[in-house]
Image (cartoon, rainbow, N blue to C red):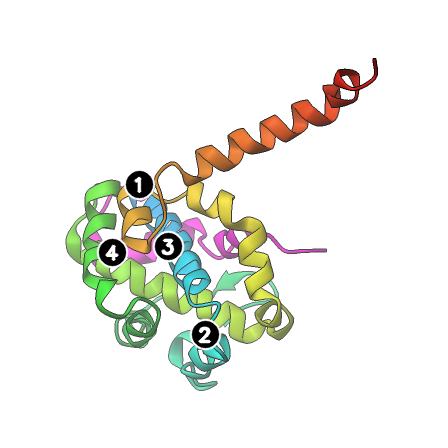
Amino acid sequence: MTPNLQIELRRFISSNVVSKLNKFYFENDALLIKGIDVSIGTVLMGLYNRAEESDFYKGITSLIQDESTFYQEVDFTSGRILSVDDCYRLEGNSLLKEIFTNKKGRISEMISNEVGIKSETAREILNFSALLVVSYLKNNIQILESLKLLLEDQKRDILNSIPPGIKIILGFSCYETVEEKNQSIGRSIFTLFGHNFFSF
């Protein structure tokens, strides 16, 4: 069965994780969850943008060592993060530099503006999300090997979870998902009624 990457990654964001993160940031729980969700989608589309670069995915996962504090704190089988500390501030930052290069600062600031959380919070949950996404991929080699196709297939749903300003920074049109949806509807109508147009 093909995994839905966003759903799989959202499983790790339990109320316990949110509560522990909020000990650092003192944000509204709902906004913090939204910020993490946006950050996860943003990281996934950042990886999508690097799909054509040979061995980029293997290279990015190799940056996470098996003895990484964060990696050891995740129970991938049960979909749980066992402990939350601030190790992701350093460990996640290096991943973001690789994925987004010089766009990292603009993206975190846009998350802050679009979601309504503090700049510091946006910066750190982006680090957290990058570490979660890449750790998940490191632990799931089969998914990593088919990541390009998975992201292509799930691109529209992921983009729909990302605010317009971030889409633009990532190089996507704000209207891209709408256009794809309209085209899909058009194809469905043609499939349903198209044969009638040519049957007489």
Stretch in magenta: 1-30
**In the rendered structure, which disc, 4 or 1, sits on the residue that comes first in sequence?**
4
Question: What is the secondary structure assignment of the residue under circle 4?
Answer: helix
SS at mark 3 in the image? helix
Side of 138 relative to 22 (left or right) = right
Q: Amino acid at mark 2?
A: Glu
Return the residue at label 4.
107
**In x, y percent, where is residue 113?**
19, 44
* Label number found at residue 53: 2
Mark 1 residue crowding within 10 angstroms, few (<14) / some (14–19) / many (20+): some
At a point 22% along the width and 68% down the height, the residue shown is 102
Q: Disc 4 and disc 1: Cα gap in Å?
A: 12 Å
Residue bearing the label numbered 3:
42
- Which of 9/3 is in front? 3
Of badges 2 and 1, nearer the viewer stands: 2
**For marks 3 and 1 on the same chain, the one whose residue lies earlier in the sequence:** 3
